[in-house]
Image (cartoon, rainbow, N blue to C red):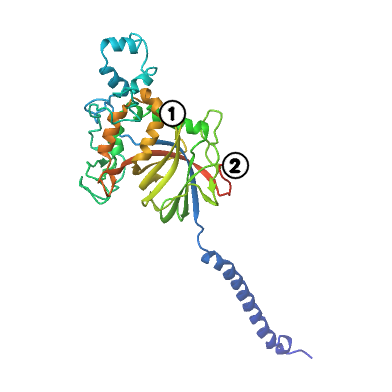
Amino acid sequence: MYMKRSDQMPVSNHSQIKPRVWMGVAAMLGCLLATAAPAQQAPKQKQTLSFVVANWDNAIYQTKFMDECPDGPAIGNDENWWRWLSRAEKDKQTERGLTQPVDRRFASVLRGPKGEDVCWNPTVIQEAPLRTIKGKTSYGFNLDGAGDDAATPKSCKHENFTGVDGASGVDNQMYRLLGCHYGWRHNGVLDTFGNEERRNSGRGVVLIEISGIDDPRNSADVSVAFYRALDSFSIDSAGRILPHASYRIDMNNGKPRYGAVAKGKIVDGVLITQPIDLKLPFYGNSAYAEIDLRDMNMKLDLTLGDDGKVRGVVGGYYDFDKWWEYMLKIEFLIATGDWSCPALYEAAKRLADGYPDPKTGECTSISSAFKIDALPAFTLHTTETAENRK
C-alpha cells in the first residue's frame, strides 16, 4: 500500500516550520535592536583639557623702530639722578665715572630732599613726565564696554586703542605706561627673568583647566578654572618644560587655594571666557606677589603650535596697590629694568582707568593685558596643601 503524498508529507509539518523560522528572525532582530539602542541613546561624554602656564608676559605691541614711542625710550632712575648732580658730585658719587649704573643704584634711588628712597616715597620729588606709548594699536580687551574715550560707571576717561585684530575700544593703560621701557619690551629683563625664575624654582605655577567640552573646536558652554600647582615644572635635561605632566592642585581647607572659575565657549578652536574677578599667585624676579584682576577676560587658541604650546591673551583691571607692591619688591632691578619710580608712579596714577573710588573719583586699577603660552598637562584634584606637600 502506497502511502498518499498527503500521508508522506502532512500539511501539519509545513505549518510548524514557518513559525519557527519567523520566530528565529524576530529573535535576531530583537538582539540587534537591543544592542544598538544603548549606543544611540548614550550621551556624548564631555572632555576636559588642562594646561600649565609656561610664560606670562606684559602684552607689549612694538614696532621695529619703536615708532610707538616718538619721544624716545623712557628715562630711567640713574639718568634722572645723574642729570641733577654737579660735576663735583658726579666725580664723588661715581669715583670719577668708574662706577657702573648697576652698582650705584643704591645711591641714585636715595635722592629725595632728605635722602628718602624715591621708590618708597615717590611723591617727594617731581620729575619730567614719563615718556609713554603714543601708538594707536594694542593687545587687550574692551573692558568697560565703551566704544569711545568717555568715562563709564566703572572707568575713568582715557584714550582707547584699536586691537591687534582690529577690534575697537581696547583698554590697556598698562601698555601705555610700560611700553617705552626697554625692561618690559620683548626679551626685556623683567618678564624674561620672571619666567626663568618660575621655571627653575617651581614657584607660582599656574594651571588652567577647561571642562565640559563637547568638541575641542566648537563648544557653546565650558567652564575654565584657574589653579595654583603644588608641584614644580617637569623639565627635561635642557631645561625645557615637558608637556603632559601631572600637577596637583594646591588646596586650603578642602578647597583650591586659588580656584576662580569662568564660563566660556570655544569658537573655531579659540577659547573665549566671560569676565570674572581673578586672583593668581605670581613669583618672579625674586619677589612673591599676587595678580589681582577685575573683569578678567581670556582668549586662548587651543591649536598647538610647532613648539607644542597654546597661546593667548589675558586682560583685566589690575589692582593698583597690588601692582605697586610688586614694583617696590623688585626695586633692586631698577637699574637693569631702567625705570624711575617718581615718574612711573605719577604716570600710573594719572593713567589708571578702572573702578573709580566712590569718594575721591580716583581710579583704583589700571587696564592691562598679558600674553601667555602654556603646555598640555593633567590636573590632579587632591586634598594636599602647600604646607603638607611631599
Provide residue 238's location: percent of width, then percent of height: 53, 28
The local secondary structure at tag 1 comes to helix
Amino acid at circle 1: Phe
Q: Quadrant of the N terminus?
A: bottom right
At a point 33% along the width and 10% down the height, the residue shown is: 92
Local packing at callout 1 (Cα closer than 10 Å; few below 14, some 14-19, many 20+) is: some
| Residue 226 placement (x, y as % from top left) | 46, 47
Q: In the displayed orientation, state which residue is furthest to the right.
A: 1
Tell me the mark number nearer the camera, choosing from 2 and 1.
2
User: Which residue shows up at 28% across the image and 39% down it?
Assistant: 173
Residue 380 higher or lower than 239, as above or below: below
Residue 62 visible in the snapshot: no
Identify the amino acid type marked 2.
Answer: Arg
- Give the residue drawn at x 29%, y 42%: 165
- Depth order, front residue of 91/20: 91
Q: Position of residue 328 (x, y in %)?
A: 38, 31
Q: Which residue is tagged 1?
A: 193
157 left or right, relative to 241 = left
Element type where label 2 sits in the image: loop
10 Å crowding of disc 2: few (<14), some (14-19), many (20+) = few
Asked if residue 39 lies left or right of residue 58, the reply is: right
Q: Look at the image and tell me whether residue 206 can be seen.
A: yes
The mark nearer the N terminus, 2 or 1, is: 1
Identify the residue position indicated by label 2 in the image: 389
Q: Position of residue 253 (x, y in %)?
A: 55, 51
Relative side of 176 to 48, left or right: left
Of 132 and 36, the residue lying toward us? 132
